[in-house]
Each structure stands twice: as structure tokens, then as C-alpha cells.
Image (cartoon, coloured by chain):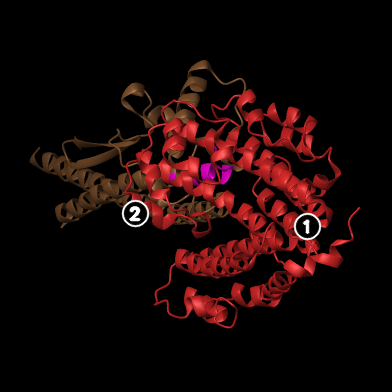
Chain colours: A red, B brown
Amino acid sequence: MYGFEALTFNIHGGYLEAIVRGHRSGLLTAADYNNLCQCETLDDIKMHLSATEYGPYLQNEPSPLHTTTIVEKCTLKLVEDYKHMLCQATEPLATFLEYITYGHMIDNVVLIVTGTLHERDVQELLEKCHPLGMFDSIATLAVAQNMRELYRLVLVDTPLAPYFSECITSEDLDDMNIEIMRNTLYKAYLEDFYKFCQKLGGATAEIMSDLLSFEADRRAVNITINSIGTELTRDDRKKLYSSFGLLYPYGHEELAVCEDIDQVRGVMEKYPPYQSIFAKLSYGESQMLDKAFYEEEVKRLCLAFEQQFHYGVFFAYMRLREQEIRNLMWISECVAQNQKSRVHDSVVFIF
Amino acid sequence: MGQEEEKGCSENGVESKEEEQDEQENNVLRFLDSLDSYLVLMDSLSSTLRQGWMELASARHSMGASRLNSALFDLKHHNAATSLEVNHHDDTTMQQTYFNLCKWASPDTQNLCSKETKLEEGELLQRKASSPQIRHRGASRSSVTVDDQVQKERSKSLSVFGALVSPKLRGAQLSFETALETLVEIANIRSSILCTHDQVQEGMKTMT
């Protein structure tokens, strides 16, 4: 039973919980989004964002702006907040915060390896990496020819090392192997993060279990939909699903054999939390599925702030900020392409 | 007799003038039809490209910027998946250029030219509206084989972004493919416009 965190949490975590709740109050509101959706140019967006917490990051950017510039600069705000919290954190919060970035680390590893396979310049690839997923030896990834070398030369000294045990082979890296590696690493990471949160116990375990289970289920659905019509076999598809979550294990059995979006819908509608998500979609359509999942995720992340004295607020803040940056990216693209009527296709309001 | 011959000649002259006028009017009509088709195709191209760019942005939103960016393009040497054939047709009156698109025709699949894939165009556009992965049952064996091969080539070209990409990216690919076909049609229509324009001008010179 939890509840005794109130006695001791503030000794080590009180300051940072206050900080993260302060950051949360700086997230954009519906009124901010309404103003942004009415912008005619990217410079208008920059002008509106100058009154928000993103202002200092965009103020020195020259015109003409590009959508990727807006996303990069807004991401710097997220990175700065994270680094401040990390440097102030004690254990086990510091480890918890580091876990939050391992997903970006995996994405960066895959980006470097894929780009190298395509004979791209390493510096160019490093510029595209997410700043939260950087580590010292990342540039050395370019020399590896297969996963065994990848592990032995570079990743053995990184936090991703324990996740490689399931995907070490001597096969040369190609597009399918890299994709399987990405998803296998992410599966191992999610399971490890889940176990870590369970060990922490209390409100952290309860809240993070719900959030990570949702993440695992969403990944299972996305893997299923994205692999329809590809060479990925049913067995390989099933191996990429995490070993926890609401869909584990029976939902995974059914998802593994799905051949189209309607079969996926049939599986997911058996689970009440996901009925509402799929009720928003018409038959045969998957365009709005991402938005439906993001809306559900935002709802759960906002609920994490309703309780005190747990680490889930840090995870929730990071994810909400990432969602906000996705919203800004989408609004910028709609404005840049003069398609403002499509703005509400993918913007998810947080407040 | 001389008067009858003169009458016959003048009747023939009137008939040939009428024929020339008819031909000239036909040329003008063909020119205007080509121009109309050109304008319709340009409008169609514009809306297809807008749709394609929006779908690409949507795919980027879904998959993330690290999975979908220009740094992942393959710089290794490889054969073009699609090529354009340019043919010149010379007839007695005019020279006209024809453009023919050979889609998804790698060296291993030389038979897959746009003539065959155009048969599936209607099906592909229909498929895009619902889902890119639904197979058409009851299709003939050869069209199913071509269909599978085309799907494989499409997936291969998208594999630079990973083996498991979002359906939105596949949708964007189809949009840009349709735009490319429209561009080739526009090129052919332009060639036809130029040809009929020259014919009309020739006709006007002849009549004056």
C-alpha cells in the first residue's frame, strides 16, 4: 500500500516536483493554439511563440523560417528543462530520468546505422539526432558492419547494452534487420523501464505501469498496422510485441495474424479502454488513429499530475512537452503549405 | 465545253476550299481541346501535389522526424526505379514528341512498363482511397503478378525510411506517383498543343 511517500518524498524530490509542476503550467493552452492556428506565415507563429516559454529560443532566428527550425529550437527548451532536472536529481530519480531518454537513444542509433548503410556523411547524421539521445561514442557507430560489431565496439558501454542480448547476430545490417533491431531494442527498453518502476513501488509504480502499458499497447498496434503487406512474418511480428500491457498475451496472439485495419479494429474493440479510440475511426480508415491514441495518452499524462509524491510527473511532463512540439510542427506545416483547414487533423489540445 | 470545264474546276476549287476550311476548323478544335486538357491536368497536378506534401507531413508527424528525413536517402549507386522514354513521331505534316513513363521497371522486371501499370491505375487510385494493402480478389493471374511486383518495388523504395513505415507514407508515395504520371500526361498534351498550334498556323497561311 502506498501513501507514506508524503513523509519522505520531499526530502529528495520535493524541489524537482515543484520545478516540473511549474514547467507544466508553462505548456500552451487552447487559447495559444487558437492564435497559432490563425497565423498566415511562419513569422507570425514565431511572433506568437515569443510570448511563450519558447520565445528566447526563437527570437534570434532569421527569416525566412523553416518548420524544422521551429521544431529544433522548441526541442532545445525541452532539453534544457531536462538537463536542469537531471543535474539536480538524486537516486533513484536520476536513473528514472535517464530511462526517459533511452527511447531517443535507440532512435539515434538506428538513424546513424541506417544513414551509414546508405553511405551518408556521419556529421550530417549527427545533426539530425535527437539531443536527448546523444552519448559520447555515438559517432563510432558508423564503423560497425553487423550487430555484433555494433555491440562490441560501441554499445557495450552505453545504457542500451543490456537490451542487445536478444538481437546480436553476425548478419550484415540491412533495412529489415535494422527495423527488427529497432523494435527489439525498444521492446527490451520498455520492459526494463517497467520493471524498474515496479521496483520503485508506490504511486510511481501504479501510475507508470498504466502509462507504460498504454505505450506498449500502442506500439503493438502500430507495428501491426505498419507491417501489413510487408515481408515481416507473423512470428517475427509477434516477437516485437512487449511482454506486458493490457493486450498481453491474448491480444498479441490476435494482432499477430491481422491482415488489415478492420481486423485490428476487431481485436482492439474487445478491450474497453480502446473501444473509445477505435469508435472515432470509420471502417477501413487509419488516418486518425494516431490522433486518437495521442488524445488518450494526453488524458492519461494529465491525470498523472493529480497525485503528488511520485516520479510519474516527470515522465508525464516530458511526454506532454513532446506532444506540444508535435503540435507546433503540425501547425507550422499547415501554415507553410497553406492548408490551414487541415490544422485540426492532428493537433491535440493539452489543456 | 470550255465553260463546263471551267465550271467543274471552280466547283472543285470551292470544294477544296471547303475541305481546307473544315480541316482548319478541326485543327482549331483539336488545339482548343488540348488546351482544355492541359488546364485540367495542371489543376489536377496542383491538387495531387498539395495532397502528397500534406500526407508526407502527416507521415513525419506520425513516425517522427528522426525516421523521416533527407539524411536517410540512399546515396549508393542503384538503378532508377522509373524511367521516361521519349519518342519522336514524324508524319507527313508535323513532328510530335511522345513521352512514355516506365514505372517500377528495374532491370529484373523489364516487362513492367507504364502500359501494364496503367491498367491498374484505376484500381490503385481506388485502393489508395481505402487502404494501400487491400488485394483485389478475382483479378487475372498476370495482373496480380504485376500488382505484387509493383507493390514490392514500392516497398523497396520506401525501405530507406525503415521496413515498417506508416500507411500515411505509403499514401504520400502514391500521391507523388500519380503526380508523376500527370506530369507525363501534361508533357504529352503540351507536345500535342504545340503540334496543333503549328498546324493551325500553317492552315492560316495556306488560306490567306
Residue A225, given in percent of the width and then of the height, sits at 64, 37
Amino acid type, mark 1: Arg
Left-right relation of A36 to A58: right
Q: Which residue occupies the extreme top position in the image?
A: B141
Compared to residue A326, the image places residue A155 above or below, namely: above
Determine the image quadrant of residue B84.
Answer: top left
Amino acid type, mark 2: Gln
B170 in magenta: yes
Q: Which residue occupies the extreme right position in the image?
A: A1
A317 or A52: nearer the viewer: A317
Tell me the SS state at disc 1: helix
Q: Residue at x 58, y 64 (%)?
A: A325
Kindly identify which residue carries mark 1.
A300
Give the magenta part as a residue range: B164-176
Query: How far is disc 1 from disc 2 in space, using C-alphas?
Result: 38 Å
Task: Find residue A123 and name its label.
Answer: 2
A120 in magenta: no
